[in-house]
Amino acid sequence: MSAPDSHSLEETFARAARHVQRLHLIFIGATLVYVGAAFALKLLAFMPQESGFILASDERMSLLLALVFMVVAIALAGTVAFALAPSRLRVSVEGRETEEVFQAIVQRSIIVIAVSDLIAVLGLIHFLVAGRLDILGALVTAGIILLFYTMPNEEKWRNAASRS
């Protein structure tokens, strides 16, 4: 089995980029849906106005939890931006069919997407526990920015393929 030719490899990377772009948009859309649901819970009074479902107006505990979640979010963002996202295109093509290369890129990209979205999920968890829309907004914004930052650019991915 030989490595795919340069043209088919470029097409494989471009197809992977388009596929991963769609996955990014799906995750961004899902994040916006659960943020909308959180606002609806608060605004329609299905949730206590001064607290979350678990913490009953315990401001110190809410702030401590927010601080822990922010530190975890920063660590996750750094890991994604500086380690996971840049390495997803470093796929060995020697002795692999183009479909195997495609699958490897997509699998690595799904990990990047999931870890990026985890930051927004932390915001949702904090909101449900403590009822703080400001923390939800901050973490969701950070998660969505990271998703946009790691969204693939088809041209750059084609160029990466030609360097492989």
Image (cartoon, rainbow, N blue to C red):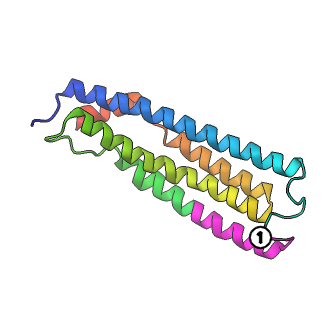
Q: Residue at image x 17%, y 31%? A: 4
Identity, as a three-letter code, of the amino acid under mark 1? Ser
Q: Is residue 98 visible?
A: yes
Taking 25 as reference, is 85 above or below it?
below
Q: Residue at image x 85%, y 71%? A: 56
Disc tally is 1
Q: Residues within 10 Å of mark 1 (few under 14, many from 20)?
A: many
Task: Describe residue 10's horizontal placement relative to residue 49 as left or right.
Answer: left
Question: In the image, residue 77 lies at what x, y percent?
Answer: 53, 56
Q: Secondary structure at mark 1?
A: helix
Magenta stretch: helix, strand or loop mostly: helix
Task: Describe residue 35's horizontal placement relative to residue 40 as left or right.
Answer: left
Question: In the image, residue 61 lies at what x, y percent?
Answer: 77, 75
Q: Is residue 72 magenta?
A: yes
Q: Quadrant of residue 29?
A: top right
Taking 83 as reference, is 154 above or below it?
above
Nearer-the-camera pick, 119 or 159: 119
Q: Is residue 47 magenta?
A: no
Q: Residue at image x 80%, y 47%? A: 39
Give the residue number, with chain letter if any, for mark 1. Answer: 62
Taking 78 as reference, is 158 above or below it?
above
Q: Which residues are magenta?
A: 54-73
Question: In the image, residue 79 lies at what x, y percent?
Answer: 46, 58
Quadrant location of the N terminus?
top left
Q: Residue at image x 87%, y 70%? A: 57
Quadrant location of the C terminus?
top left
